[in-house]
Amino acid sequence: MEADYAIHTIDTGFKRAHFDAAYLVVENGHGAFVDTGTHHSVPHLLAALEEAAVSRADVDWVILTHVHLDHAGGAGELLRHLPNARLAVHPRGARHMIDPSRLWAGATEVYGEARMKADYGYATPVDPGRVVEVADGECLALEGRELTCFDTPGHARHHICIWDERSRSFFTGDTFGLSYRELDTGRGPFVLPTTTPVQFDPEALHASIDRLLSNNPQGMYLTHYGRVEDLARMADDLHRTIDAMVEVALAHADEPDAHSGIAEDLALLYAQDLAAHGVANGRDAARELLCDDIELNTQGLVVWLGQRRR
């Protein structure tokens, strides 16, 4: 927990330790979750409530940065245990929480049925009466503590980041990239953009990152993973890497097997960046720790290339 701000970082247990976080914000005995992990994550979230001495009846909000299943797959199941909580979500994502079948089918196309069951469990629909569609700039009140929603497209069109004035920090979902603690060095956190299919928009992502920085935050709470600082440097790294990834994609745009070429060049790009950041054996770290991200980022870039041709 961040002692000064009553923000609890919860390891959801998805994939590996310190990979996927949800957050519990506590104010005057009431709580708000930001992101939920998967269906399998719900016991971890309920245990965090007990540890924070917050009753299930006193959770006011479950707030989703976006509806990708590693962030939102457990929302419906979690709400079954929280009688008074409402779900706050981007208007583009609300219907997928009320009826997650299309979202589930899309993810199954990417991962396959067996992996979906093992990694994500299943998605419980949310009662429409408990869903609040949040507009850009809308404030959610938690016992007088304002949590302000910012529309931040680029990773997904249904993405919001949540500004906590108390801590002067954002909960960023995937907008401020991925930063795994295993890759921290003396230079600070290593950060990587995520272009997970199917709504990557590099110009929008650049603009969203700049918008977050314009609030002069003291920290960012990333879903993948934890609180980071050194934000101006990290934002510069994100901007540079977004542009480099776009260049990689465009270089392979006309090839019959663009996917393979992009994946190979992303692995090389990340290995070089890791080495420059001071990570020993940067190539091995890229292949091992970032293998899933390389694949998902490749898929996102391939989809983006196809959308550009339309």
Image (cartoon, rainbow, N blue to C red):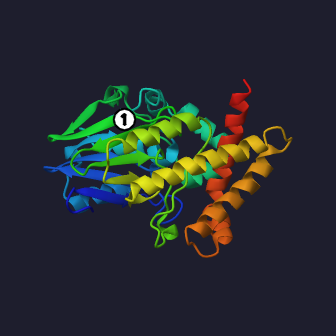
The residue nearer to you, when weighing 205 against 111, is 205
Quadrant of res 289:
bottom right
Q: Is residue 218 left or right of residue 196?
A: left
* Label 1 crowd bin: few (<14), some (14–19), many (20+), radius 10 Å: many
How many marks the image carries: the answer is 1
Q: Position of residue 178 (x, y in %)?
A: 51, 55
Q: Position of residue 155 (x, y in %)?
A: 53, 40
Q: Residue furthest bottom?
A: 280
Q: Position of residue 261 (x, y in %)?
A: 79, 50
Figure check: 176 above or below 309: below
- Residue drawn at x 15%, y 51% as measured from the top left: 29
Asked whether the viewer can see residue 42, the reply is no
Q: Quadrant of the C terminus?
A: top right
- Residue drawn at x 49%, y 51% as measured from the top left: 236
Q: Position of residue 69 (x, y in %)?
A: 51, 44
Q: Quadrant of the N terminus?
A: bottom left
Q: Is residue 235 left or right of residue 273?
A: left
Q: Which residue does the numbered mark 1 point to in the structure image? A: 150
Figure check: 106 above or below 57: above
**What amino acid is labelled 1 in the image?**
Phe
Q: Is residue 18 left or right of residue 246?
A: left
The residue nearer to you, when weighing 102 against 235, is 235
- Residue drawn at x 40%, y 54% as measured from the top left: 231
Figure check: 212 above or below 18: above
Q: Residue furthest top?
A: 310
* SS type, badge 1: strand
Asked whether the viewer can see residue 28, the reply is yes
Q: Residue furthest right?
A: 256
Q: Is residue 28 left or right of residue 244?
A: left
